[in-house]
Amino acid sequence: MNTDLLTFFQPEESSGTAATFSVDVDKEIAIEVWMFSREKIDLSRFARTAVSSEEDWKNFHQELQASLQPGGGFLVYAQAHNDGVKAQIFRKEAPGYQPPNRMLRLTLCGDAQFEEIKNNVDLRVGDHLVLPVNGQAEGRLTALRDDLKGLPSDLESSVLNIIRRPSLEWRLDRIERTLSLPQATQADQRKCQARQSSFMERLYDFVMWKVPIGPVVGALLLMAGTLLAYDKFFHAASATEAPVKESKVPQVNPTPHPSPPSPPPPVKPAPKDLKASLDALFKSLETSGDPHIHGLYTTHFKGHREDALKVQNVSWGITKLQTMELGFLEKKSPVVNDVSAWTNTEKIYRDNNENFDTLKRDQNAVDLLAYTWCQQSGAPSLPMTQTYKQPLQLKGTCDDVEPEDAVPGLEALTAWVNKQSEQIKVSLRK
């Protein structure tokens, strides 16, 4: 599957399902979505979805991820940001699925380069990602890139450019539609297209088309002819437009009529500070009127505010708090204040699939635990213990979770700790 921003590299066309569609967020933001599933599934039900709240988006995101659960795959979001695009890439793990580690970035200028697949990717104007769907496809893509290096540099660039740019059918159709308009409309269209269309409208118009299949030489010849035709049309239109402009422009500059201002883009709040969120949690634990929670603070958190995420006891303390907040561990359990109760803490998820599934559905909790253990052990997973010889995976890699991703989970834990204190106060007043 190919669009102007991303191509899933899938050597075996018969395996898996690929789809792309748009999601309208609160009627103001459009997010492009690309999905690849190793299983044959129906992804058309997600097309043209609209969400109006953060909770709707969270549920929609979880539904997309759940659809990839049986066999694994990829979920990619792209959204306009200033003059570029910000993309998020999610790899869904599954038994027997070997995800790739690298993707190929094509650019307007310079050599095509392989880079590590990360959760957050910034795309500049003209950038294009070629994303292999599995480890085997990554090897085939590497071989293809190496083979192209045997061509002369100009032909190598032309072949890669066919992948990066919109399809020739799209170009011809657009020129034919433009040529069928009256001459004044052609000029207005050229002048106003970039000014009046939003970035996401242009993005949607430009990307959702497939590249044609055919011999490379034929494609290049057709592209050359198309560009030549468009160049002649452009100069012809400019020549006919110039006399009209000259006859209408007076010697004295007229008073300009200002265009109505464009509505400002929606302002997104800046990511909250991780340290501030950690400090708030520490303060709530330290001042908690709940003796069980204050006991957890004493055994796991006290004295570690400055180096919190580098201390193993703090990592286990956050894990236990999250388990209590989800309702899987009672506050009065001896596990809470036992700094050596690693196995018994993980047992809550290891031996109960329903508990682990509930955790995985809470994205804030997953991001918080994944980031916490990435800082502690370098892996987004609950660690090995004497009983459990393999880590319990929460995310693909530590690149899949950023510091700001842990903030909502910390805020939720802080709110839960404060709620427990309030309940103690209410019971004492009674």
Image (cartoon, grey):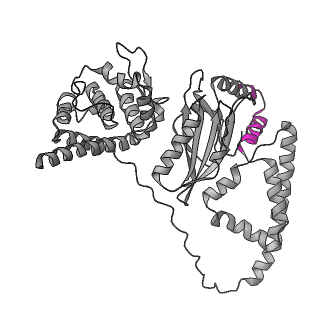
- Residue 124: say if magenta: no
Along the viewing direction, whichever of 430 and 417 lies nearer the viewer: 430
- In this picture, residue 139 sits left or right of residue 52: right
Question: Residue at 17% across / 41% down in the picture?
Answer: 288
Kindly give the residue lying farthest to the front in the view shown: 430
Furthest-left residue in view? 429
Is most of the magenta stretch helix, strand or loop?
A: helix
Question: How many marks on residues?
Answer: 0
The answer to whether residue 163 is magenta is yes
Quarter that holds the N terminus: top right
Q: Indicate the quadrant where residue 17 lies.
A: top right
Instruction: Decide which of 274, 330 is in the foreground and name it.
Output: 330
Q: Which residues are magenta?
A: 146-164
Q: Specify whether 55 is left or right of 175.
A: left
Residue 236 percent location from the top left of the image: 84, 66
Location of residue 186 (image quadrant): bottom right
Q: Is residue 426 left or right of residue 186?
A: left
Q: Residue at (66%, 22%) from the top-left corner?
A: 136
